[in-house]
Image (cartoon, rainbow, N blue to C red):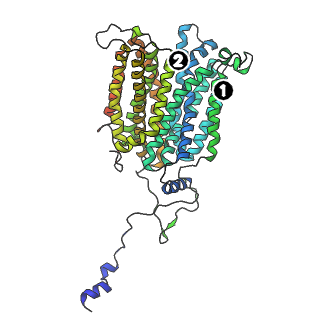
Amino acid sequence: MDNTTRSRTFPDHDEANATPPLPEAAAPVYYEGCPGCAMERKVENNTGIPYKEFVFVGVTSLASALPISSLFPFLYFMIQDMRVAKNEQDIGVYAGLLGASYMAGRFAGSLFWGVVADRVGRKPIIAFSLFTVVILNTLFGLSINYWMALTTRLLLGSLNGMLAPMKAYCVEVCRPEHHALGLSVLSSAWGIGLVIGPSIGGYLAQPAKHYPNLFSENSIFGRFPYFLPCLCISLVALGALISCIWLPETLHMHKNLEVEVEMVGDSRPAPRREAPYPEKSLYNNRPLMSSIAAYCVFTLHDTAYSEIFSLWTVSDKKFGGLGFSSKDVGQVLAVSGAGLLVYQLFIFRHVHNLLGSVNSLRIASALSIPILASYPFMTNLSGTKLGLALYFAAIAKGALAMTILTGNAILQNNAVSQNQRGAANGLSATGQSLFKTIAPVGAGVLFSWAQKRQNAMFFPGDQIIFVILNLVELLGLVLSFKPFLSLPKKYDFK
């Protein structure tokens, strides 16, 4: 045999002792009895859209959002009936405190419930939150005085910790290419709930007065005139609570399992699944905190816009408003909600797949500015032209806002590992709740100030309102660029 043949048959000493090459990719590791592993296995084997889980997300988000704004149509009359205000001018103060109490409670409890969801699971927190909606929202409708109403709303906000685990749940039940759809389902259902809630409150409050043939003054709905809308919303939450029986858990739970590591391939111990990012303090996680900062600014803008839009449309034309009735405003909001649903179901996913999270939110934020700038000039229109312009602007603004917030939510969820996702979303919800508490108050003060400067040289009347709204939107847009926004290195967000 020549040397060449011998070298092939008998490798030299260095080659014989060389470490065999590692496989290119380690096989997935699943732990017996872990619900998170079971869900991951299901997601990996199913390439389609998880419609059942997304329907649950939509129904649950709707049930959680309905009580937030359902009281606004009857809040003034509720305060009046409770006789807590010494005069009519003080009703607004008590109404403002009661209206803001829910978000104040959510500001206090969101981070706590997010952390708990990372310890005990998503399902228990979601179920408990729905239970609190059923009980406390019902008690709110049965309030016999102002302080009982204030307490129940404050507790409802602080004990309803659903938002953080639901955002985490959305991305844990589907493949990465469906994350945008899952989060858009949540945000759309939430937005629709904020539109439908006031409709329920407006149509069903004081039923003995509005529907005397159906409800007697001596019945429970006559003695508690604001109980019926609260009861209807509580029944929706009860239905969502019952559906939690079939809700799968998604959190990984390995610590208490007897079998710590499965054997894969050639019976070698498989490496443990590692988090995509090393665990560290959320406050030191720059990608997370920078996306939350932008998220809070956009939340401030959207909440202030919602408040100002309603006030502007009903204010008198001599003050730069449209002079609409409450029925007209409800119709615009209903059409806007329907348009948002169509956008979410048929358009948004394609927009996100084409542009990615970052580019889609940047473009949506930039497009919002000229739309808002057009609002003051609609006062020069009337009839069909006004209707078409307003409907188009309201639908477009709602769709763009959903694109922005969903893109931010995706950035936040991908900036942390799964066992920090609940806490991260809780931290985000805490900031969001703070700005949602501030925004209505600031918007009301801003609107009152604008009404008094009709003859100003620059941006008179309501024009200054939309200028300031656009400045806030511009700030959010700036925060979506470097160096303010930091992106996780392992992900390509375009």
Tell me the amino acid under the disc marked 2: Lys
Is residue 233 visible in the rendered image? The answer is: yes
Quarter placement of the N terminus: bottom left
Which residue is disc 1 drawn over? 139
Which residue is depicted at the point 43% across and 24% down? 391
Which one is nearer the viewer's eye here, 199 or 186?
199
Which residue is depicted at the point 34% across and 21% down? 374
Which one is nearer the viewer's eye here, 375 or 122?
375
82 sits to left or right of 316: right
- Residue at the right extreme of this rendering: 218
The percent position of residue 200, horizontal first and vertical second, equals 59, 24
Q: Quadrant of residue 129?
A: top right
313 sits to left or right of 21: right
Tell me the amino acid under the disc marked 1: Leu
Which residue is depicted at the point 61% across and 40% down? 127
Q: Which label number is shown at residue 327?
A: 2
Tag 1, which secondary structure?
helix
The percent position of residue 275, horizontal first and vertical second, equals 43, 53
- Residue at the bottom extreme of this rendering: 1
The answer to whether residue 31 is above or below residue 129 is below
The percent position of residue 176, horizontal first and vertical second, equals 43, 49
Disc 1 crowd, CA 10 A, few/some/many (<14, 14-19, 20+): many
Tag 2, which secondary structure?
helix
The percent position of residue 217, horizontal first and vertical second, equals 72, 15
Which one is nearer the viewer's eye here, 286 or 245?
245
**Earlier residue among tags 1 and 2:** 1
